[in-house]
Image (spheres, helix red, strand yellow):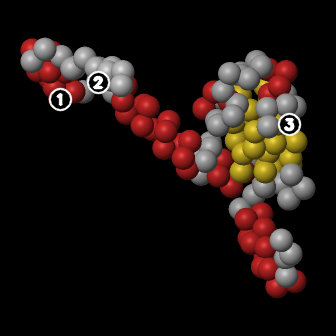
Amino acid sequence: MAVSEQEFIQAEKRTQAHRQAGYAVAARYDRRTARVVVKLNTDVQISFPPRLAEGLAGASPEDLAVIEITPSGLGLHWPRLDADLYVPGLMTGQLGSKRWMAAQLGAAGGRVRSPAKVASSRENGRKGGRPRKVSPSPA
């Protein structure tokens, strides 16, 4: 796919606009606190536990320690994990793609125990519980 000169100029302008809010100048994994620490050009530091980020959960400290910053400073890449995070997204609390974040929120919501959920579960139990799965009969 060829990129026109106009598209290239527009992309450069978008990159510069994103960089004005801050960009990564250093990134490291702090074993002591078990957190990824990102230093921005504004002297602000962002840190987060890798278990909360897409592609980083369950990774070894050795794999988490190898972090590359993209030339624009807007991306972080873990080559050993083939994982990437977008720095402007990190600044707004986005630790993964929209799809991944939605799945995390759905899983967290499913674990919530509210009085209404408990009452519904008990009522369902009185009715005999969840119906058993029936395997399809062989044809």
Task: State yes or no: discs 3 and 1 in contact (Cβ < 8 Å).
Answer: no
- Earlier in the chain: of badge 2 and badge 3, it is 3
Q: Kindly state the secondary structure of the residue where label 3 is placed.
A: loop
Along the line of sight, which residue is nearer the eye, 40 or 84? 84
- The residue wearing badge 3 is 79
Residue 116, label in figure: 1
The vertical placement of 20 against 51, above or below, is: below
Left or right: 96, with 120 as reference point: right
Residue 131: % across, % down = 21, 20
Residue furthest to the front in view is: 139
Q: Quadrant of the C terminus?
A: top left
Q: Quadrant of the N terminus?
A: bottom right
Residue at image position (70%, 41%) is: 46
Residue at image position (36%, 21%) is: 138
The vertical placement of 86 against 131, above or below, is: below
Residue 20 visible in rendering: no
- Earlier in the chain: of badge 3 and badge 1, it is 3
Residue 113, label in figure: 2
Residue at image position (66%, 47%) is: 90
Task: State yes or no: discs 2 and 3 in contact (Cβ < 8 Å).
Answer: no
Residue 117: % across, % down = 21, 27
Q: Amino acid at mark 1?
A: Ala
Task: State yes or no: discs 1 and 2 in contact (Cβ < 8 Å).
Answer: no
